[in-house]
Amino acid sequence: MSAPFFKFGLFGNEVSLIVAFIIGIGFGFFLERAGFGSARKLAAQFYFRDMAVFKVMFTAIITAMLGLFYFSWLGWVDLSLVYLTPTFIWADLAGGLILGIGFVIGGYCPGTSGVACATGKMDGYVFVLGLFFGIFAFGEAFPWIAGFFNAAPMGQITLPQLLDIPYGVLVFFVVLIALGGFLLAEKIEKYFAQKDAGKAL
Amino acid sequence: MDPTIDTLSVPKTETNKKVKVKAAQPYWNPYLSGFGLGLVLLAAFVIMGRGLGASGAFSTVVASGVNAIAPHHASGNAFYEGYLGDGTTSPFKSWLVFEVLGLIIGGFISGALAGRIKKTTEKSEHISFKMRYVYAFFGGALMGIGAKLARGCTSGQALTGGALLNVGSWIFMLMVFAGAYGAAYFVRRQWL
């Protein structure tokens, strides 16, 4: 088996758009199943009331990570052909921080706002308008911030490469961290549920 | 009148006229949803050699809008140009645009099957609708700026790059949680 299929020329650009549409349906379906069309459900993560954002995200990450690890180990997938966004430390740091602040204020992220709109959330539509405005503001300011945007380029680099740790060992550690995180998340939810119940009495 | 519906338990108010009696189903277990999401991401890796994304499709819409109104302005800007392509094909014929169209359909299918399609606004009872919309717009704008600065959002960076053990994505992900937890206190009345 030679994968990624698209990179090995199994189908062309036109078919790739159909693939995009079908993958998108799966993406939106599971986001909605998880409750991520609801801003209150998403925001509850940041008040320790509902840790679903963390649980869903890290379950998805370790599922895809383990799948890709085994497929590449078996020689089915050529990992070097899977696109990796290049690392720019300052832009990643600042962008993540601004996005995180925007997440708890706005209640959605770009993907979940699409699901919110599809399920009738009016604040989701307003969020999307804000999103368009923010991207436009970024585009207009781009000539002035391009220097910062492109500062400290590290190229396409993975944690195993950076830390000089074997791929499989790092995969194992990430799984351990995620499992520890899940246990902690369950405990945190219980603690705050009891605390809130105490307050109500 | 459907005899199976207990009319006494449904208050006869204006707002209840159009509300379906069928209650919305609970959400799936987060680990099950996450596993499904992980399989979709894995499928994107194996079939396409790329991960999922979202903010890029919104950028295509913005860049095309700017290009329609002020083409010279757009072509002189490296950020917009990146989304407009070489002009031989429509910028809307891009992978992320089709993926996000699918995402909207997929979200609708799941919501419809679970009885969760409903016109509402998500907020606590402590703030007005107007304030919620101000927050939604402002938060969305910050989200747009942050996602473009970081070359991706929660989908393209955190989820995709997280699974690929991408250095920049893990930096990004830690900062998203730091930013959101750090700012949470100041907007708590909106949610709690």
Image: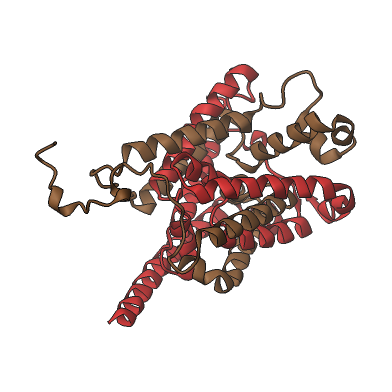
Chain colours: A red, B brown
Inspect this view and state whether residue A52 appears. Answer: yes
Tag count:
0
Residue B87 in which image quadrant: top right
Residue, x 33% and y 49% (percent of image)?
B28
Q: Is residue B47 above or below residue B137?
A: above
Q: In front here: A121 or B77? A: A121
Q: Residue at x 74, y 33 (%)?
A: B65
| Nearest the eye: B86 or A183 | B86
Q: Position of residue A10 (x, y in %)?
A: 59, 18
- From the viewer's perspective, is residue B41 above or below residue A131? above
Q: Quadrant of residue B184?
A: bottom right
The quadrant of the rendering that contains the N terminus of chain B is top left
B164 relative to B108, above or below: below
Nearer-the-camera pick, A160 or B90:
B90
Q: Position of residue B63 (x, y in %)?
A: 75, 36
Q: Residue sitting at 85 percent across and 39 percent down?
A: B78
In the rendered image, residue A106, in percent from the top left (x then y), is placed at 58, 57
* Residue at the farthest left position: B3
**Which residue lies at the image location 77% right of the left edge and 49% below the top edge?**
A137
Residue A70 visible at all: no
- Residue A186 appears left or right of A177: left
**Quadrant of residue B160 within the rendered picture:** top right
- A63 sits left or right of B111 in the view: right
